[in-house]
Amino acid sequence: MFKKRNIYFLVLLLALLLISAAQINASAVVENKAELSNYFYRIGVLDNEKIEMDSKLGWNEFNHLFQKALPGHEIDLDLIWEKEPDLIQAYAQIIKAIDQEEFVYTYNDQLSQKERFSRAAETINLIPREDYEQELNYENSLNLLLYARTELGYYKPYLGHVNDEDIYRESRKKYESINIDYFREEASQLFSLGVKALQEISGGKFTGYNIKDHNENPIFNQSHMIRYDHGNLGHLLQMISLLRRENFDAHWDIQSRISSYVHHSDEWGEPDPNSVIEEIAENRVVVGSASYDILIEFADINELSKFKTMIDNFARRKVEDTTGLIRAPYYAPVYASINDLSGYEKVIGMKVYSDNFYLQSYILKEHADEVIEEVKTISSQIDGDFDVEYDEYYVNPEFVDYLENNLE
């Protein structure tokens, strides 16, 4: 009897722990302040990336962030019951924005307005760890606004952990949703800039470009992250299996991108008409194809450093026979980190921002100054608001060989 009671107790305790874990996950906040502020800076909500995240906000400052982060939504003055904002009043504004306000009034009408919103916020897992009475600052405001952007479909949170039950299904769904027409329509100025750069930068120093949406960048710890480029669905799904089998503790996401480069029609045959971005010379066209970045956040730097060995053993093509490798391995894959890891080589990563979108390209460090200056000149000739930035990245040596072999 004693043993049976112990078993019942353990089962009950496990159930409670699972429920608690689910609640914690549902109301999780972004711990990395730098990544949180960087996201909101890149999408134009913050005017300055280097803000004091603990700085207190008044209603005017919160309203400014609210309207920029949630286009089409405005602060409801009827939901302000105190002169100074606090978390629960901010919750009230978020609850209305995500279409949950009427639910609040189904609670007992003997409760105060504050109590109703507090209980509703708990029900929909809006409440993070902070107390209701805590003052409003940049950090908790941006976390609330990120929650609302996620619920409204403006921000796509990362897909999950490599061991999640639905990670294969969600990854396939994300892959199938990549839409080249969406990017060409919404980021047309960046495509124009990329085409001109391919035309005007000589010598193969600018090999091509990717167009991406910053709203698809998960708020990961960059120092623990690898960005891995590919285009094949089977490769994508089997990469999850590799990470699982090799016991990596990793968060996983997929970022849509359109990869563009110069296609030589006279040597390679006519391209798919739907992929042609622009004709730039006889037998030379810029083509674009839908592909993806795999974004992997490892538990620590030691796990990140093991990734290269796994790719070399099971995902990089070395000879024609690909037996023993996952589907569609590249001779020269590309994966990049901001860390100076053993076996990696330094390149310059250039990004050109325009609204929520950006153009990205890796450049050999000896040609980076020239390419970046030419891109800045080209951007000044195109109607649009561009911001050209660059930083150091470390990539696998096979990709550096590819860049060097592309030089004329």
Image (cartoon, grey):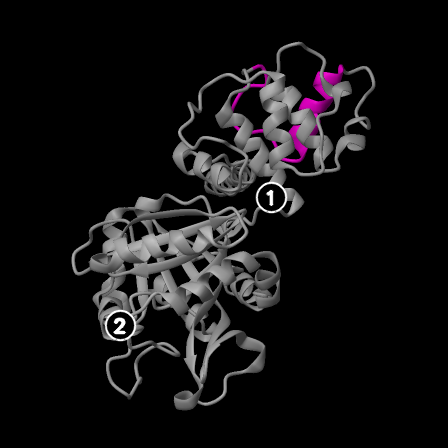
Magenta span of residues: 112-133
Number of the label disc, if any, that sits on residue 402: 2
Looking at the image, residue 191 sits to the left or right of residue 390; the answer is right
Q: Could you say where residue 280 lies in the image, as x and y percent from the top left? A: 47, 75
Asked whether 210 falls inside the magenta stretch, the response is: no
- SS type, badge 2: helix
Crowding at mark 2 (Cα within 10 Å: few <14, some 14-19, many 20+)? some
Q: CA distance from mark 1 to mark 2?
A: 38 Å
Q: Could you say where residue 404 lies in the image, as x and y percent from the top left? A: 22, 70
Q: Is residue 292 visible?
A: no
Question: In this orientation, which residue lies closer to the viewer: 406 or 236?
Answer: 406
* Amino acid on which disc 2 is placed: Tyr
Can you say whether 150 is above or below 115 in the image?
below
Of tags 1 and 2, the one toward the viewer is 2
- SS type, badge 1: helix
Q: Which residue is mark 1?
A: 150
Q: At 49% from the left edge and 57% from the top edge, which residue is drawn?
A: 212
Question: In this orientation, which residue lies closer to the viewer: 330 or 117?
Answer: 330
Can you say whether 137 is above or below 159 in the image?
above
Q: Is residue 146 visible?
A: yes
Question: In this orientation, which residue lies closer to the viewer: 158 or 346?
Answer: 346
Q: At 24% from the left edge and 61% from the top edge, which residue is drawn?
A: 364
Looking at the image, residue 326 sits to the left or right of residue 231; the answer is left
Q: Could you say where residue 284 lies in the image, as x and y percent from the top left? A: 44, 80
Q: Could you say where residue 222 lies in the image, as x and y percent from the top left? A: 35, 45
